[in-house]
Amino acid sequence: MDMIDPFGRSISYLRVSVTDRCDFRCTYCMAEDMTFLPKKDLLSLEELDRLCTVFIEKGVKKLRLTGGEPLVRKNVMHLIRQLSRHIESGALEELTLTTNGSQLSRFAGELADCGVRRINVSLDTLDPDKFHAITRWGHLSKVMEGIDAAQAAGLHIKLNAVALKGFNDTEIPDMLRWANGRGMDLTVIETMPMGEIDADRTDQYMPLSLLRANLERQLTLTDIPFKTGGPARYVDVAETGGRLGFITPMTHNFCESCNRVRLTCTGTLYMCLGQEDAADLRAPLRASEGNELLSNAIDEAIGRKPKGHDFIIDRRTNRPSVSRHMSVTGG
Ligand code: SAM
Ligand code: SF4
């Protein structure tokens, strides 16, 4: 009994933000002085496990942990270890995470041991000074150690870079050569207007159509039908023999094939990254020991998954389209 939304899309992918906290403060993602959710509102690791398990029973095949930074949640490996039973049983096809890489050198081996095969690492630049500037609190060397450790543990890595005008747009060809040279795909992402940040988003916004045109002056890009289950569209890069992905929420609408929903660390389910509508699953989770109320609440929520988002980055309003930060729903 799969979950099918009103537009006939089968919901098989759950992303769970296990914490909204982070050890970085990337300028496009967070304000430096962030107010986080009160700790008392957080779901326990056991509750997160129970929620994920119900989703898996209802047809979720792919589970991605994200945040905030998922690896800074206390005892997160306990949750991952628990969830790995669904990989072993075959109920879940993929258990994965999106991380900034800061803690990877510590956890890479254990992640591989829990059945994690692929991870996404966010990396916007290969220049240590620029890295520190964009993350405010991060150190590139630590992330590089993490990437080394993850590859040594046999994890496949996809790198994600947010394209930022005047910051890394001219560096993307070098990043691509470096990533592909180490057997990693790279995906570039357009900035999305989510949450108040200290910077002006219209200054940072870089349409990927423009980035692609610039890249094609030095690289040969060929569209390919390759898919990873996400919204990226891929090209082959003749010069590197690797792949480059484009995620274009702003310039290209990929909502038609959306197969995912997002759960926050307080048990709020967002049916669309770009809409405010949400369903509270914490109350039905806590209301009884059985899962019937929870299951009904999930069905009801999927029944109102919207057709798509309407992000715009508009100079006149200069306000986020969605007030919550990306770190709440985890991208
Ligand atoms: N902390 C982890 C990380 O950075 O990979 C996971 C959470 S982070 C919110 C997930 C992804 O969202 C990262 O790749 C980040 O670059 C991206 N992101 C954050 N804010 C964004 C925004 N406003 N627009 C587009 N992507 C954003
Ligand atoms: Fe933290 Fe990821 Fe947001 Fe950067 S993008 S501040 S690493 S949650």
Image: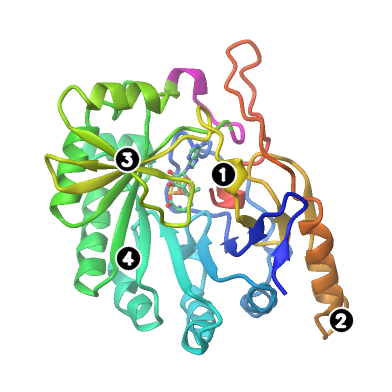
Distance Cα–Cα, label 1 vs label 3: 16 Å
User: What range of the chain is rendered magenta?
Assistant: 194-203
Label number found at residue 104: 4
Which kind of residue does numbered mark 3 sit on?
A: Asp
Q: Is residue 208 visible?
A: yes
Q: Are marks 1 and 3 in contact (CB under 8 Å)?
A: no
Which kind of residue does numbered mark 2 sit on?
A: Ser
Residue 139: x and y in percent read 28, 48
Distance Cα–Cα, label 4 vs label 3: 17 Å
Horizontally, residue 128 falls left or right of residue 181, namely right
Distance Cα–Cα, label 4 vs label 2: 37 Å
For image coordinates 19% across by 63% down, the residue present is: 148
Q: Is residue 263 visible?
A: no
Does residue 259 belong to the magenta stretch?
Answer: no
Residue identified by numbered label 1: 326
Disc nearer the start of the sequence (3/2): 3
Mark 1 surroundings within 10 Å by alpha-carbon count, few (fewer than 14), some (14 through 19), many (20 or more): many
Total numbered badges shown on the rendered structure: 4
